[in-house]
Amino acid sequence: MRVSFQVLADEQLQVVHEAGLRVLERTGMRFGSERVVERLRAVGASVDEGRGGTFGGIVRFPPRLVEEAVASNQRVLREGKKMVLLNGVTSERTAGTQIRAKVSGGCNRYLDWESDKLREADPDALLRFIRLGEMLPEVSFVGNPIVLSRDQEGRPIDERTRRIRTAALIAKNTRKLGSMEVWSEAEIDLLVEIGTIARGGREAYLERPCLVTAKETISPLFLDENASGVLLALAARGLPCTIIPMPLTGLSAPVTPLGNAVVGNAEILGTITAIKAFHPEALVGGGTISGVLDMRTGVVSFSAPEAILQDIALAEVHERLYGFDYLVGSGYTDAKYPASEVLAEKTAKFLFTFLSGRTSYPVGLINAGSVFSDLQCLVDLELCRYIHGHFAAFGWAPGDPATPGALDELVELIDRVGIQGNYVEADHTLAHFRERWMPQLFDRSSFLSLEDSRARDLYAAARARLGELYAAGDYWELEPEKQREIDRVVRTAERTLS
């Protein structure tokens, strides 16, 4: 099956790029880090000291400087370095059409489906969600669906060690290690050490980095001191270095999708240029999680149709013009609760994510990415399977030598079954029916009564399936000696960060 989907025409890619250059040259970008401002001045940018204030200087970029940074990124790619984009709420490009779901999100709360209440993140819930991701075959990335706020005894965890303790629990209980939030430079080496233990060594870790993630600009056109420091620290260590703006159409970006894309790209290009000024051999990636301001309510929507299209438009600029992979904001939904709205929003976002060449879907997030739901996680995977089912092979492959023989077989089968015949008992049916999409949660049974139908609701089926999975009892765990090494890292974090 051939499917073509494209937001921007070829000539529009250059237009978006050049508009971003003009913004950086004319308006500039504010940096909260004095060392970033001074370094950019040293390599040829101009700095407006008078308007900087306590939040840093405004840097204006000559287009040449930005173009050189993009060309440097392209050179590093040509030399064989792999661009790794680590983020749990976005989608990167994937090879093939296999579902590669992400259980992540960095939420502070989760939906307890048994009590139907929102609860603060706790170790028991995090452990359940990690194990769920480890068990589900379509999940390839288990990050931090929730970030611990209390320990096993219910005591508050020091804010400075929350990420370390969360990462430790994840690393001990899954082989599918994904990303972890990084809030300070001091956390990086500790998170990397945990990932290195789990991966089995430094070389294996660098081949498949984990437990770090992207940082964000503050739209419009500001990169604060903390984000600058973390990104530069990641780049200095040769780790994935990614910047993800969150421009909001009508609020922190112009009210048109094109305006949103121009602001977002200017922020990414300015950040790439800043990092490259320090570390020319760094490979810096980008992405966006854009939203749209609802002018009636004043609330930001992440599931408006424009939101995913804005992100994909910028992805096309980075892929087709620059040659870089790019993250699109596929994980957030406006729906507050697992119900009909979330099904509509996620189906649309996941469909366009698929059409953009991405099958790395964040699953389980609701309420603008602030709440994780394991119930929604299972339903999201069913939606992904449903979408992929629409693009399965049709059984016709022009030029395939097997096609004429298959057609001959079909003609003979139709003749053999005959007029008003039945194919259920045919050997051909037994051989091929599993090739079609088979729902795991959707109800295809006969209608009996309203009560019976409600009992077979999609979410009712997901609840039953969750119960079965959690009752399995046979969970994967990291080797005991490696768990003890990770515990040692946690103790170090408690001494040095607290």
Image (tube, grey):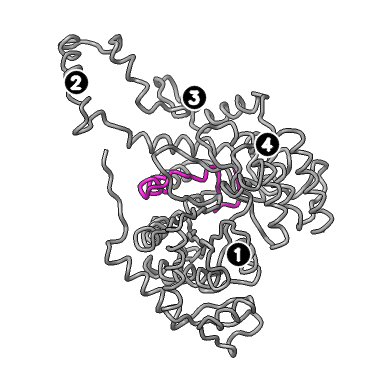
Label 2, label 3: how many angstroms apart (C-alpha)? 49 Å
Between residue 413 and residue 323, name the one nearer to us: 323
Residue type pointed to by label 3 = Glu
- Sequence-wise, the earlier of marks 3 and 4 is 4
Within the image, what quadrant is residue 168 found in? top right
Picture disc at residue 354: none
Residue that numbered label 1 is attached to: 231
Label 1, label 4: how many angstroms apart (C-alpha)? 28 Å
Q: Residues within 10 Å of mark 2 (few under 14, many from 20)?
A: few
- Sequence-wise, the earlier of marks 1 and 4 is 4
Residue 268 image point, x, y percent: 48, 67
Residue type pointed to by label 2 = Gly
Residue type pointed to by label 1 = Leu
Could you tell me which residue is drawn at 54 percent across and 53 percent down? 368
- Sequence-wise, the earlier of marks 1 and 3 is 1
| Helix, strand or loop under label 4 | helix
Q: Residues within 10 Å of mark 4 (few under 14, many from 20)?
A: many
Residue 494, relative to residue 407: is it above or below? below
Q: Residues within 10 Å of mark 3 (few under 14, many from 20)?
A: few
Residue 444 image point, x, y percent: 40, 24
Q: Which residues are magenta?
A: 348-372
Residue mark closest to the camera, 1 vs 3: 1
Can residue 371 be seen here? The reply is yes
Picture disc at residue 451: 3
> Which residue is farthest bottom?
50
Within the image, what quadrant is residue 6 found in? bottom left
Q: Image check: 430 left or right of 480?
A: left
Picture disc at residue 173: 4
- Sequence-wise, the earlier of marks 2 and 3 is 2
Residue that numbered label 2 is attached to: 405
Can residue 120 be seen here? The reply is no
